[in-house]
Image (tube, rainbow, N blue to C red):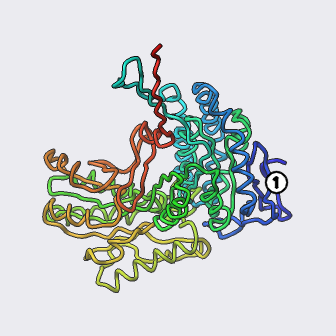
C-alpha cells in the first residue's frame, strides 16, 4: 500500500499509518476526519487505530530494536542526517499540509519544517559524542565503567500546535541513542507527521525502528502508555493529559518525559528597552495564533514605562492582519478548531465581567471571509487583577492581559505565584537583577531582552506543572539513555 490515496470524494485524501516500514490502515477500517480550520471542510482522513494497532506497532518496534542499537552510532547518525535532508527537500509540500490541517501561516509552516529537520540533524551529528564515565575503584585492578544504553521501545506523543516539529524533536534523540519509537500524532493535526513515513523509507531507516500511528487517546494512546513493551514515554501537550499519562505509566514504573502547559510572565522593568519589549511581545504572543506553550501570557509592566508600552503595543497589535494563512500578508491565521476558539472567547468574557477593560479586539472578527473557520481577534486587556483566570490559567490564543507593577520584587512575586513554570520574559539592563533572576524566577526557560525561541543546543525544560524531563541539547539527549554500571575486575 502507498502512503496516501484519494477517497471517493475527490477532494479528500486518505493517509495511512506507517508500521514495520509499510503503510497500512487500522485493523477496524475506521477513519478520523481532519478538517480545515480555515474553511471547516474535511481535507483528509486517517486511520482510527485501536489497541490492536498499538500492540502491532510496539511488537514491531521491539523486534527491530536490538539490531538498531547494535549498529555503530555513526551509522545511525548518518541515516538520520539523510532523513533530515529529505525533510528539507520536501519543505514546501510538508508546509502546505501544515497550513491546511493546522491553520498556521505559510511562512511559519516553512519555519516549522526547517526546525523539524534540525531537530533530527542536531542529535544525528552528535552520535559520536554519546559518552559514559570511567571511575577509579576502591579495589585494586578494577575499573568502574558507567555506560549509557538505550531504553529500548519508546513512545512519542505530540501536541497539535507544532505536530511535525514536536514529533521530530523526539525522533531525533530517541533514534540516535539506539532506541526505537512509536509516534502518535494528535488526531486534529496528524497528516504532516504521517507523511514522514515515506521519507523514513527513502532515508533507509530499517523497518520497525520508526512507526507512526493514529487513533484515540483513550484506546490507542492508553495501550501505548501502559503496554509492558514500552520503556519510555515522551509527551508534549496539556498538563491534564500529561498528569494522566504519568499516572498510567506509574503502574509499570515506565520512564516519563513531559513538556506541558505554560503561563509565561512578561516583565518589563523601568530601565527596559520599551521598543525592543514591544517588538518581542508582538512576535511572541501572536506567533501561531498564540498557540505556543512558551508565549507570554501575562504582562507585568513597570509604572514608569506602562503608558508608553501600552500605547506602542496597542498600536502594533491593531495593525496585525487576520486572514488566509496562505496569504503572505497574513499575520494571524485561524484557531485550530471550534473548541479552542470557544474557550478563548469564554476566558475573555469572564475577564471583562470581572472588571478588565478591552483596549484592542475582544471578539470574533466580522465579515464574509470569517463566516467559516475559527477566528479570534488579537486582544489586549488592561485593569486586570492577579486573581482573574486570564492571569492564572493557560490561555492558548492571542490575548494579552496587562497589569501594572511598581518594582522587580512585585513582578517576581506575581510571576512565581503560578502552578506553571515553563518560560518567562524579562526586560531590563540591570545585570544585578538579571543575575538574581537566575536564582529567583521559577521557570525552566527565561528569555532576557529578546523574543521567545529556543535553540537546539539549549535545554527546553519546564518546572512545576509545566513538565518533567526536558528536551534538546546534550541534556535532552541524555533523557533517552539509561545508565548501566560495570565493575570490571581484572586481577589474576
The answer to whether one can see residue 100 in this image is: no
Q: Is residue 199 left or right of residue 290?
A: right
Point out residue 190 in the picture as x, y percentages from the top left corner: 65, 57
Position above or below: 469 against 390: above
Locate residue 200, reporting x and y percent: 69, 39
Query: Is residue 139 rendered to the left or right of residue 96?
Result: left
> Which quadrant of the view contains residue 363?
bottom left
Residue at the location (69% across, 35% down)?
205
The answer to whether residue 259 is above or below residue 129 is: below
Q: Residue furthest front?
A: 492
Q: Residue under circle 1?
A: 5
Q: Vertical placement of 462 versus 363: above or below?
A: above
Judged left or right of residue 343, residue 153 is: right
Residue occupying image coordinates x 31% and y 84%: 354
**Taking 446 as reference, is 150 left or right?**
right
Q: Residue furthest bottom?
A: 353
| Residue 12, quarter of the rendered image | bottom right
What residue is at 31 percent from the left and 50 percent from the top?
A: 446
SS for callout 1: strand
Residue 377 location (% of width, % of height) = 45, 71
Can see residue 25? yes
Q: Residue 55 versus residue 190: which sits nearer the camera?
A: 55
Local crowd size for mark 1, using a 10 Å CA cut-off: few (<14), some (14–19), many (≥20): some
Residue situated furthest top in the rendering: 492
Residue 88: image location, x then y, percent: 61, 37
Question: What is the count of numbered marks?
Answer: 1
Q: Quadrant of residue 20?
A: top right
Amino acid at each position: 500500500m502507498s502512503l496516501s490515496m484519494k477517497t471517493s470524494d475527490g477532494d479528500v485524501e486518505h493517509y495511512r499509518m506507517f508500521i514495520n516500514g509499510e503503510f497500512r490502515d487500522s485493523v477496524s477500517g475506521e477513519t478520523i476526519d481532519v478538517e480545515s480550520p480555515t474553511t471547516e471542510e474535511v481535507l483528509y482522513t486517517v486511520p482510527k487505530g485501536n489497541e490492536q494497532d498499538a500492540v502491532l506497532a510496539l511488537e514491531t518496534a521491539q523486534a527491530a530494536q536490538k539490531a538498531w542499537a547494535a549498529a555503530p552510532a555513526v551509522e545511525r547518525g548518518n541515516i538520520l542526517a539523510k532523513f533530515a535532508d529529505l525533510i528539507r527537500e520536501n519543505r514546501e509540500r510538508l508546509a502546505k499540509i501544515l497550513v491546511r490541517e493546522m491553520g498556521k501561516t505559510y511562512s511559519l509552516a516553512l519555519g516549522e519544517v526547517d526546525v523539524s529537520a534540525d531537530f533530527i540533524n542536531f542529535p544525528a551529528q552528535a552520535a559520536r559524542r554519546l559518552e559514559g564515565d570511567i571511575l577509579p575503584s576502591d579495589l585494586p585492578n578494577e575499573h568502574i565503567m558507567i555506560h549509557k544504553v538505550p531504553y529500548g521501545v519508546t513512545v512519542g506523543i505530540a501536541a497539535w500546535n507544532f505536530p511535525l516539529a514536536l514529533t521530530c524533536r523526539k525522533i531525533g534523540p530517541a533514534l540516535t541513542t539506539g532506541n526505537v519509537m512509536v509516534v502518535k500524532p494528535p488526531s486534529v493535526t496528524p497528516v504532516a507527521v504521517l507523511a514522514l513515513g515515506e521519507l523514513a523509507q527513502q532515508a533507509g531507516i530499517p523497518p520497525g525502528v520508526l512507526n507512526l500511528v493514529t487513533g484515540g487517546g483513550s484506546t490507542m494512546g492508553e495501550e501505548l502508555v501502559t503496554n509492558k513493551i514500552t520503556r519510555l514515554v515522551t509527551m508534549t501537550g496539556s498538563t491534564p493529559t500529561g498528569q494522566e499519562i504519568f499516572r498510567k505509566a506509574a503502574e509499570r514504573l515506565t520512564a516519563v518525559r513531559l513538556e506541558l502547559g505554560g503561563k509565561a510572565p512578561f516583565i518589563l522593568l523601568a530601565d527596559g528597552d520599551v521598543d525592543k519589549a514591544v517588538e518581542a511581545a508582538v512576535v511572541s504572543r501572536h506567533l501561531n495564533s498564540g498557540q505556543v506553550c512558551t508565549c507570554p501570557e501575562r504582562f507585568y509592566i513597570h509604572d514608569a514605562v506602562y503608558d508608553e508600552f501600552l500605547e506602542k503595543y496597542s498600536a502594533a497589535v491593531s495593525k496585525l492582519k487576520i486572514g488566509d494563512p496562505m496569504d503572505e500578508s497574513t499575520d494571524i491565521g485561524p484557531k485550530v478548531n471550534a473548541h479552542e476558539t470557544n474557550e478563548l472567547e469564554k476566558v475573555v468574557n469572564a475577564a471583562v465581567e470581572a472588571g478588565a477593560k478591552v483596549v484592542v479586539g475582544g471578539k470574533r472578527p466580522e465579515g464574509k471571509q470569517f463566516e467559516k473557520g475559527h477566528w479570534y481577534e488579537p486582544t489586549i486587556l488592561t485593569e486586570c487583577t492577579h486573581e482573574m483566570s486570564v492571569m492564572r490559567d493557560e490561555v492558548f490564543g492571542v490575548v494579552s492581559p496587562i497589569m501594572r507593577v511598581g518594582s522587580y520584587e512585585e513582578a517576581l512575586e506575581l510571576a512565581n505565584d503560578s502552578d506553571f513554570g515553563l518560560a518567562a520574559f524579562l526586560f531590563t539592563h540591570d545585570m544585578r537583577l538579571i543575575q538574581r533572576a537566575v536564582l529567583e524566577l521559577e521557570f525552566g526557560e527565561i528569555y532576557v531582552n529578546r523574543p521567545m525561541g529556543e535553540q537546539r543546543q539549549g535545554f527546553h525544560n519546564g518546572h512545576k506543572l509545566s513538565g518533567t524531563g526536558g528536551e534538546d541539547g546534550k541534556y535532552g539527549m541524555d533523557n533517552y539513555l539509561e545508565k548501566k554500571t560495570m565493575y570490571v575486575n581484572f586481577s589474576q
